Amino acid sequence: MPPTSPRILETKLNPPAVVVTQVLRTAISEQIAAAAVKLVLVRAPAGFGKTTAMAQSRQRMEADGVATAWLTLDRADNDVSRFLICLGEAVQRLGVDEPPANAPFDAVAALAAHDSPFTLFLDDFEVVQEPAVLGLVREVIDHLPRRGRIVIGSRSLPDLGVGRLRARGQLMEIDTDRLRFNIDETSAFFGQRAGQALPADMLSQLHRKTEGWVAAIWLASMALERHGLETGFVERFSGSDRAVADYLAEDVLAHQPREIRDFLLRTSILRQLDASVCQTLNPRVDCAAILDQLAASNLFLTPVASDTPAWRYHSLFADFLRAQLARERPDELARLHLAASGWYESQGRPVPAIDHAIEGGDHPHALTLLDSYAEEFLEQGRMRMLSRWFSAIPEHQLRAHPFLQLIALWAACFTYGPWDAMKKLEQSGCAESGIPEVRASAHTLTPLLLAMQDRYDEAYEAGRESLARLPTGLPFADSALLNAMANIISVVGDQHESQRLLDAARSRQGNSTFNRMYTESLEGMLDLHGGRLRQATARFRMAVDSTHAVSYNHSHGNAWAGVLYAGVVYEANQLPQADHLLNVYLPLARDVGLPDHMILSHVMRSRIAFYTGDIDAAFQALTELEYLGHHRQLPRVVAGAKLERSRMLLLQGNGPASRDELARADDPALWDRERRQRLPAHDLDYLALARARWEISFGDPRVALTALDAELHAAIAAARSRRALKLRVLRALALQRAGDVAAALEEIGAVLQTASQEGFMRLILDEGPAVGLLVQRYATAAQERSAADGRSDPILAEYLQRLLQVLGPMVAPNVEAPSADGNKEPLTRKEIRVLQLLAEGYSNNAMAEKLFVSDSTVRTHLRNINMKLDAKSRTQAVAIARKLGVIR
């Protein structure tokens, strides 16, 4: 089943149609249209006219020739895949360039590259709680082009870094006070609705009591139509909070004909109304006629689009109706939800069918539907949706469906993590079930859960026993076990057996897109550790896309594959794309709690931030990783954060602090285990390698060479080609530091020739400026040889050009400090602070933000620093300042 139907998607892509009784919010529309900001946030509680103000602003912009797109969000958009599909549909309506046939369409990138003025409207944003979706929206905002803008309507303050945008002058806020009707607007509203103005004293009293709350004014107008102006109605109520709306709504509802009142209450459970589904809930009346009548009188309904016969209730009124239904007719709730569920089921739409069954408390019917569809959803990898449903069903009812119990456990494993799933497995009794297939399949889950908890030795023993029970009768479980054991056996060191199990898993996975993702991911890991980066990239891309074949964005798959794909994109030095993928997959990996994926994703996030000059964000990512490790009692995760912090401090030139972090990461039992196992997060980052790196920078390079030679011998013997490549990079640096430049150039040359064939970039670049000097020397020598003999390797030449372009102009590290000169003007305190930030890796933009000055002021400071220190570049200025003791 597709994630959404075209009709529903169309309603999400259009604002509610304009109705004649709307008061024009001209001032607000002009303010939004003229705002030179990235984000306009229209924030207020329900009933203040946010959507109307946004829709009118959109009309104003389109009249001015600005392209616009609209997206109304709902709870289902917390699914990253669905959100990106809807966002992509909206973005394409802006007139962005479409990709070539069968090429990926990346909505985020398309917005960033669009050079014409545009505004994207996102309404009902308060429903978005998923961190991955919020991260994507933050990314869209951060990368908006100069003439792009986003307008968000929300009841609450969204987690989009609005404080940062506010400080930069990139945010406009339209709040409750701005949205309230003034007395003239209140008068205009009554004039449009009733065709006559209210007496001035009554208008003033009503406006004062409602405080300009649009929903209350709207409901009061309907009540006054019933009571008339002479009844003292306005004097009888007070206040402007939710109680007023409830009071007015109740008054309006009480005066409806019984047929209309029944219709309103019964259909209040629906999120969207059309005649067919309403007829199911009200079989004795003509629902199409009632909908037309209500729409014509403009009392209760808001059209969801101008070109579809579908409506919704105002959210405030809908909330009241549902509460009233629950109070007056609690016995009808289950029947109504069951009727809606049956209608959606008859339309081949199992997701809303199951939703209504659960919301109505009819768990037996929900379980009946899940009996038919849950396995299909599991095969598709729709774990979060399944977990949401199963968590709402009482455990004792689920126990009557043992096969659904198993599916609930699999969904929990990949949504809430292995600890929660293991607890549920132990409480479920599935491992002792009297049904052989259930019992065997429950045992297949155990090794996977143990491995996800970083207990690979136990997982290996449990998995060998489970393999002996195959087949279990559940193809998904069988294929998942084979995949899990392939991963476990790869970690414990038998690559050939791991490959054999992956082949077996592929032969049994059938139509399971989830298991196809799992298999391709694991094969990609084998390729990556074997140094086959291009093949690994293809496998990870296929794995990410396999769970959501309806899209081509590479941002919709399972976190297991997504983090690994982000890793190879990062390795290719495509940092914006890697950061985009991490916005999607890092929160998911964090929630599930896979140790290797947590380490890999947070370290990548930290390195990208460090490279772009955001040192605070780089350290923050590692602090979060360390906290997760402590919280989940995963020492390896804690050690991973400390190792990376040591590397960052080393690149900043802080040897003592870097060494202290290495000492804190030294857990003998952990690193002894790492030597015995192939743990993905430590293929390139482990204690022995980190110590050698420190010795190269601050200690004895000959000590580093001895350690590196031993590590290199072990890596080659174990066919760990990627690790061997990394060790050879460090070996070249050690030789350079020891003064053997010729040997260093020979070593780095061999590395570059191998790396160029596969496209390894960050494996080299992540070693910082020292390796840049070596690459530059090798490239210069290669050019001289090519000029002399007329022969060159075009792949290597192009690769070297890409590396040098990233590295930029390099300066030799042995810079002499200028002689003391009393005539030289001393550095100011602000200039010393700029030097400190420069030494820590901050970019001009980041320094400007840190110092609360403009970019041009930072550039002025840098020019003054270079002049005072006789430096030719920022790298040279830092080196001279350290030599003089100005900075550490």
Image: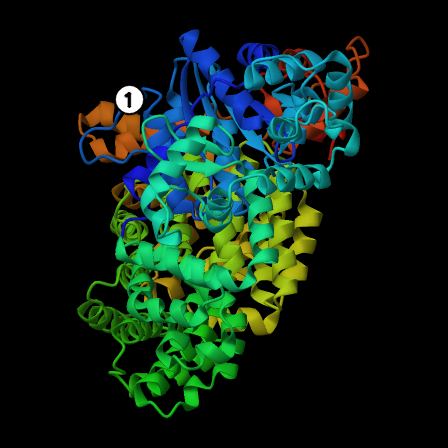
Asked whether residue 96 is in view, the answer is yes
- State the residue at coordinates (42%, 87%): 431
User: Looking at the figure, which quarter contains the C terminus?
Assistant: top right
Residue 703 in which image quadrant:
bottom right
**Residue positioned 29% across, 74% down in the render:** 482
Amino acid at the residue labelled 1 = Asp
Quarter occupied by residue 344 = bottom left
Q: Residue furthest bottom?
A: 434
* SS label for mark 1: loop
Viewer-closest of 454 and 384: 384
Task: Pick whichever, 631 or 226, lies toward us.
Answer: 226
Query: Viewer-proximal residue, 528 or 794?
Result: 528
- Find residue 288 and report its horizontal and vertical position in percent: 34, 39
Left or right, residue 705 beside residue 309 = right
Would residue 789 be found to the left or right of residue 294 on screen?
A: left
Q: Say if residue 606 shows up in the picture.
A: no
Looking at the image, is 638 positioned above or below residue 2? below
Please provide percent x and percent y for residue 260.
48, 42
Counting from the top left corner in percent of width and height, residue 747 is at: 37, 46
User: Residue 56: x, y in percent?
Assistant: 50, 17
Can you name the residue that lies furthest to the front here?
230
Q: Residue under circle 1? A: 97
Display coloring? rainbow
The number of discs equals 1
